[in-house]
Amino acid sequence: MNEFVIRTHNLTKKYHDRAAVNSLNLSIGRGEIYGFLGPNGAGKTTTIRMLLGLIRPTSGKVEIFGKDLQKDRLNILKKVGSLVEYPSYYGHLSAVENLEAIRRILNLPKSRIAEVLDIVSLTKEARRSVKGYSLGMKQRLGIASALLGSPELLILDEPTNGLDPSGIQEIRELIKRMPKEHGITVLVSSHLLSEVELMAGSVGIIAQGRMVFQDTIEHLQHQASSTIEMTVSEPEAAVWIARDSGLTGQLQEGRIHFDGLSNTQVAGLVRRLVENKHDIYRVEEKRKSLEDIFMQIVGTGGSL
């Protein structure tokens, strides 16, 4: 069995002379939740449409389950569930009736409808008209539709877009259960780093159609360098004591800033300052946020 569920090789989509996606190399392992992250307009949805065979790449290759999508499209897509942008449904029908329409097309057993409604926690609302659903419930119904065919891979494009905090949490917890309880690999796109951080193990960051970062969330967090900020009674003299200990600090507005100190170094410096009759008013660690790192990586001052 192939280690990777999705691999792309220099995947490119051009519209006239503009590359919406440019030489993209995705690598998504089996059983992962992979966060596909980038600002609006970065090329996430275009990439997802190519992964689903909805649009043809200008160049490059898509492999899903170790097979070439272009050569074995139908067999591959039978094992893929997706929700791209907003879910489609018949508002005057119930959740059961909406899923029944899909079930007949896919020729699945009727029991599968109850199973997916239970997975997305819509069993109690199954007979209600969908037009009366909240946006979060409609998103969960869309995910139920994507799960109907028992997919091995689930692709979700901005599934929390427009939801209130309660709806976002419901969708997030639902996604987190997919690999653990159902063995499903999940690709979830978002422009919100804070959301991806809470559910994904790996992340790919795309900007202007290019992959600018691809690794684990843990590795991304390690890039968040911390600064120690120290407030003492005699800051100028304290800077010299620190230098005598081999630590370089910068004095700013009466506070001393140190980059990348270990806990042992901080404790040693505090002890040395106290021994030299300095009063220590505050020692604070300030860590760069993941949003700051994201803006560094994509090289733009725009909003997420």
Image: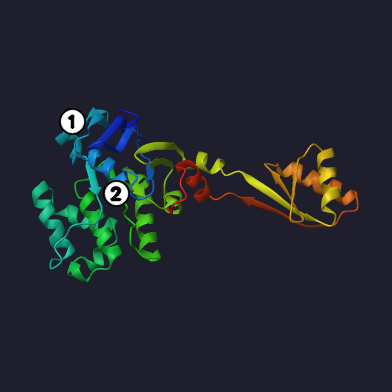
Q: Are marks 1 and 2 in contact (CB under 8 Å)?
A: no
- Label 2 crowd bin: few (<14), some (14–19), many (20+), radius 10 Å: many
Residue topped by disc 1: 70
**Frontmost residue, 97 versus 23:** 23
Above or below 111: residue 135: below
Please state the horizontal and vertical placement of residue 188, each as a whole percent of the image. Answer: 34, 47
Q: Quadrant of the N terminus?
A: top left
Residue type at numbered disc 2: Leu
Q: Which mark is residue 156?
A: 2
Judge from the rendering whether residue 286 lies leftward or rightward of residue 209; answer left or right: right
Please state the horizontal and vertical placement of residue 226, each as a whole percent of the image. Answer: 63, 46
Answer with mark 1 or mark 2, whichever residue precedes in sequence: 1
Residue extending farthest front: 17
The residue depicted at 51 percent of the width and 39 percent of the height is 219
The residue depicted at 58 percent of the width and 49 percent of the height is 288
Judge from the rendering whether residue 136 lies leftward or rightward of residue 58; answer left or right: right
- Distance of label 1 from label 2 (alpha carbons): 21 Å
Please state the horizontal and vertical placement of residue 89, each as a whole percent of the image. Answer: 16, 60
The residue depicted at 19 percent of the width and 69 percent of the height is 131
Judge from the rendering whether residue 174 lies leftward or rightward of residue 71; answer left or right: right
Q: Secondary structure at mark 2?
A: strand
Q: Which mark is residue 262?
A: none
Residue 51 image-quadrant placement: top left
Judge from the rendering whether residue 279 lies leftward or rightward of residue 39; answer left or right: right
Above or below 264: residue 140: below
Residue type at numbered disc 1: Gln
